[in-house]
Amino acid sequence: MLRHMDDIQKQSGIEPAAQTAEEKKSAGPTVLFIEDDSLLLKMYQTKFESEGFKVISALDGEEGLSAALEQNVDLIILDIMMPRLSGLDMLSKYRQDVKGKGVPVIILTNLTREEEMKRAKELGVKEFIVKADYTPSEVVRKIKDYLGK
Amino acid sequence: MPTNDSNQSSSDTEIDQQKEEFISLVAHEFRAPLTAIKGYLSMILEGDAGNISDKARGFIADALAVNERLVRLVNNMLNVSRIEKGKLVFQMEKVNLSRIASVALDNFRAEADRKGLKFSLEIPSRIDDLIYIDVDKINEVVANLVSNAVKYTENGFVKIKVSNPSEGVIRLEVNDSGPGISQEEQRLLFRKFYRVESTAGKTVGSGLGLYICKLLVEKFNGKIGVESDLDKGSTFWFELTTVKKEES
């Protein structure tokens, strides 16, 4: 099941952020955000949508895997530590499916252990972004740079 | 039959591993709220929540600067044992050091302005500054040096300067008009947990920042140092080898 902004806000009791005209346009690339922290998800989703991305979101690895297999996305932004199915286990399953071979995956996490970074590389991850080191705008810029390469 | 020494050493290794695992998990938990605070505050400053007054902008910039200090502290805690054990994973790429210096200037502008410091960056119009490095790690080195300069300088200036002291070498220095450091303390500065006596207790710090800067710069085959005198300010610097566009 896919989560959309309204569901996340209802679940977390968070009031929707003020919407600007910019936020309503979403003609750009479609990204799938797989992130279990609903507060961070809302933050990134708000920023990415205001920058013209279409955002689909999922709150754990299992939801993320279903979304990735059902939807056509240009890029997946994946957290690592999540309930039910971790980001890297999700990615491993996704890569076994024919649909999961070519879609680029960027890891956005606060976990920076050697084991996970190595495994991510083995699974074809090109960028490993530490959340706490970047503002949402900087993450958007990195993703735009990546998609523009 | 194993000796007592080897028993002791395997138990030490186990404790070390548990300690590292614990630090890693605690740091991960710390980073989530720090990410949210940094993210939302920066979005307010960028106008995502509409217009705000200059006074509110100043308050938010200060809160953001304090939050950044905590982000650096958590990074330092995480990095120190990993670098020492050679377990830090690097993501190497080509980057211009001048760009890293400009980012540092932007990131510390608000804090320097709040203290009334003259804060500047000097880059010659022609510079050979392409390096092959882990961008996040070199950002941490520059941020540690600039953060110290801004933190310890109460009046005057902080100047970041990028130059080529010789062909194929790029140097970044952070010069300040702060209290300066005695010759004796300069020899101890880059040691783990060392804090300059005159500043210990007056400011927040772990004594890990410069130690990590040294480990990282040396990991990238560079040199790091300080030139200073009491009451005459300090210049912290590092030098790295440059690469050509087609090399890696």
Image: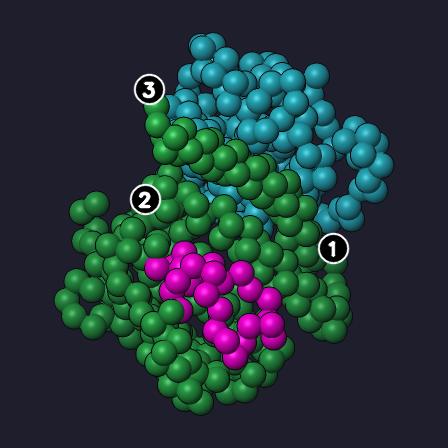
**Chain drawn in cyan:** A
- Mark 2 vs mark 1: in front: 2
- Whether tag 3 and tag 1 are in contact, CB under 8 A, the answer is no
Q: Does residue A103 appear to the left or right of B245 in the view shown?
A: right
Q: Is residue A117 visible?
A: no
- What colour scheme governs how the chains and residues are painted in the rendered image of this protein? by chain
Q: Which residues are magenta?
A: B189-214
| Quarter occupied by the C terminus of chain B | top left
Q: Is residue B96 visible?
A: yes
Q: Amino acid at mark 2?
A: Met
- Number of numbered labels in the structure image: 3
Q: Residue at x 26, y 63 (%)?
A: B223
Label 3, on which residue?
B1
Label 2, on which residue?
B92
Extreme residue toward the left, this view: B167
Identify the subunit bearing mark 3: B
- Whether tag 3 and tag 2 are in contact, CB under 8 A, the answer is no
Residue B128 numbered mark, or none = none
- Mark 3 vs mark 1: in front: 3
Label 1, on which residue?
B49
Do badges 3 and 1 share one subunit?
Answer: yes
Secondary structure state at the residue bearing disc 1: loop
Q: Residue at x 63, y 31 (%)?
A: A35
Residue A85 x/y as whole percent: 60, 18
Q: Residue at x 61, y 41 (%)?
A: B26
